[in-house]
Image (cartoon, rainbow, N blue to C red):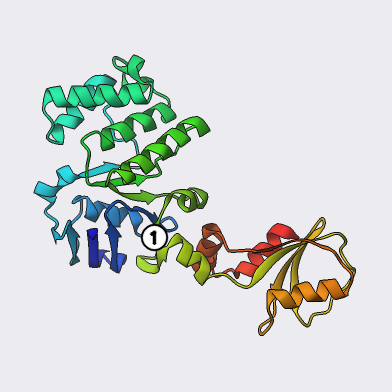
Amino acid sequence: MSLLEIKNLKKYFATQKAVDDISFSLEKGSIFGLLGPNGAGKTTLIRMITGIFYPDEGEILLDGKKFDPVNDVGQIGYMPEERGLYKKMKIGEQAVYLAQLKGLSKSEAIERVKHWFIKFEMQSWWNKKIEDLSKGMGQKLQFVTTVLHEPKLIILDEPFSGLDPVNSNLIKDEINNLSKRGATIIFSTHRMEQVEEICDHIVLVNKGKKILDGSVAEVKQQFKENLYNIGLDQIPSSFSQQFFEVIGKKENSLVIKINHGFRSNDVLQYFIQQNINVASFNEMLPSLNDIFIKLVEGTPLSRQFQSVTA
């Protein structure tokens, strides 16, 4: 069942179509990647989902009902890319205050803040001020204040910005734990390797329009280009072009593209007949970064692989 449904959403600023007829849905408990280059419309879309902006056209449904920004905002946790904390306020006091704004009693807020501070080893920060925190420490605090009221929908915009690898893994583990406990998560970032690792489903937007929508596995299968990495004990000086095209070379391996009408077995048989030992043979599925560049910039995937391996 869908927790969030976006139906034909539009938002215009003067002559600019910031969001132009976008539709998608998020299943309960899923981790959803919202991707796009700068200026694609991601932030405007998020601001409509959180009730900061009203759409010019279209509809937002939350848990099967029309989204009401006044009454439903308590079911959402939003961590913006920009730090949204009061610099002069003490950290513990601020976390408790923000939890109370989300409907928790003071005692509930204190209990949950202490729980998260212990989990993230932040107990000693209670009386520090926001202005005294590093960017990474501020990110941990923003994450805590986003999730401590246990929202149904969690929106994380570049949540790993400024975090070292240890704390990045800590946040990543908590994102997965929240999903397993039923929270639905929108994850917006420019770092495609994190999307591949974390997300179940992605939507790619560009110039206000949705240009890709699907599970990570489906998308990678959709854009594969019959490319293979083949490891050889020796690299011949020339090849027959009947079965495949050589895209790139690196040490004792080749990136090849199998020609239309032929199979991987035909290529293997070719090397066997040439008395060349094949050490490895693996299909190369494109990364989300490759697909992103192809769709946004129009660069063919095979050319991207060639630039990497040449």
Q: Position of residue 255 (x, y in %)?
A: 72, 65
- Left or right of 1 on screen, residue 123: right
Q: Quadrant of residue 148?
A: top left
Residue for point 40% across, 56% down: 200
Whether 217 is drawn above or below 113: the answer is below
Residue toward you, 174 or 141 = 174
Residue toward you, 125 or 75 = 75
Q: Position of residue 46 (x, y in %)?
A: 28, 53
Residue toward you, 265 or 178 = 265
Q: Quadrant of residue 87?
A: top left
Location of the C terminus by quadrant is: bottom right
Give the crowd class for mark 1: few <14, some 14-19, many >=20 residues within 10 Å: many
Q: Position of residue 70 (x, y in %)?
A: 10, 48
Whether 283 is drawn above or below 108: the answer is below
Q: Position of residue 32 (x, y in %)?
A: 36, 54
Residue for point 36% across, 45% down: 157
Callout 1: helix, strand or loop?
A: loop
User: Can residue 29 be seen at all in this image of the molecule?
Assistant: yes
- Left or right of 281 on screen, residue 164: left
Location of the N terminus by quadrant is: bottom left
Q: Which residue type carries mark 1?
A: Ala
Residue for point 66% across, 85% down: 261
Q: Quadrant of residue 66?
A: bottom left
Residue at numbered disc 1: 40
User: Can residue 205 be seen at all in this image of the molecule?
Assistant: no
Residue for point 38% across, 33% down: 139
